[in-house]
Image (cartoon, grey):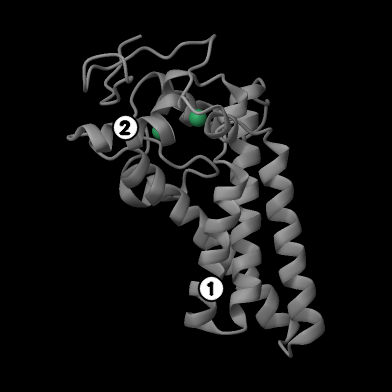
Amino acid sequence: MKRTSTFSAPDENRYKPFTPKHTGKRQLFQNPYLERLTRTHILVPISVFFIFASFLLYYVAVYKSLSFLLLAGSFVVGMFAFTLIEYLVHRYVFHLFPDTPEKADFQYKFHGVHHEYPKDKDRLAMPPILSALIISLFFGLYYLIMGNLAYGFTAGFAIGYASYLGVHYMVHAFQPPKNFFKILWINHGIHHYKNDDVAFGVSSPLWDWVFGTLPK
Ligand SMILES: [Zn+2]
Ligand SMILES: [Zn+2]
């Protein structure tokens, strides 16, 4: 199948498209500890996000006076906001054009390796330590912006993140279901195997529809 990718593997010429490989894996770091950190069972980050979200919801319910409506509302908005961040990061960060060796290296480690070895199941999520750090920073930022609403918002955001990880794992590990969720399998398959300039949304096609990157 023809590839239009701008990715390049470290040992190939820069910007030379590669073909996705269905077996094998690649070492990303010489240092064994760093290398170990790049591999994670998908249930580790999913559990981390669920525990983090539960803690936030428990804390705000017990120690803060926020109405149920505001808490539930901020949770739903947070989940929805995650789907937009998911789209933007995948499109503009993970698929940034690698016009310098540094960008190519960054892009390969964060995302290109997944495009080259899409079936390497231990590399479907960032290292949990890194994602825990990022979500804590997000919580701090949201707290500065929206005060106590940040508890519900960040909990929703974290559950959105966990759902995305679950969907992405299932799309790569299991056969497509025979219901309307099948569209997620089809779109992500197109992104990986036909055209990585389209279908950046993994957990939903909504933002591809909004920004005009739905596959034809
Ligand atoms: Zn991608
Ligand atoms: Zn994928």
Residue 13 in the image: state x and y as whole percent. 21, 15
Q: Place residue 135 in its image quadrant.
A: bottom right
Q: Residues within 10 Å of mark 2 (few under 14, many from 20)?
A: some
Q: Quadrant of the N terminus?
A: top left
User: Quick one: SS at disc 2?
Assistant: helix
In the current view of this chain or complex, which residue is farthest to the bottom?
A: 65
Q: Is residue 179 above or below residue 71?
A: above
* Residue in front for this viewpoint, 50 or 173: 50
Question: Disc 1, disc 2: CB below 8 Å?
Answer: no
The CA span between labels 1 and 2 is: 29 Å
Q: Is mark 1 within 8 Å of ligand 1?
A: no
Q: Position of residue 175 (x, y in %)?
A: 65, 20
- Earlier in the chain: of badge 1 and badge 2, it is 2
Q: Is mark 2 within 8 Å of ligand 1?
A: no
Q: Amino acid at mark 2?
A: Asp
For image coordinates 74% across by 90% down, the residue present is 65
Q: 46 or 196: nearer the eye?
A: 46
In the rendered image, the vertical position of residue 128 relative to residue 179, given as above or below: below
Residue 215 placement, left or right of 120: left
At label 1, the amino acid type is Gly
Residue that mark 1 sits on: 140
In the image, which disc is placed on residue 60? none
Residue at 34% in and 45% down: 93
Q: Which residue is mark 2?
A: 105
Residue located 32% across and 37% down the image = 95
Q: Secondary structure at mark 1?
A: helix
Q: Is residue 197 left or right of residue 204?
A: left
Pick the quarter of the image with the C terminus: top left
Residue at far left of view: 99
Q: Is residue 120 above or below residue 123?
A: above
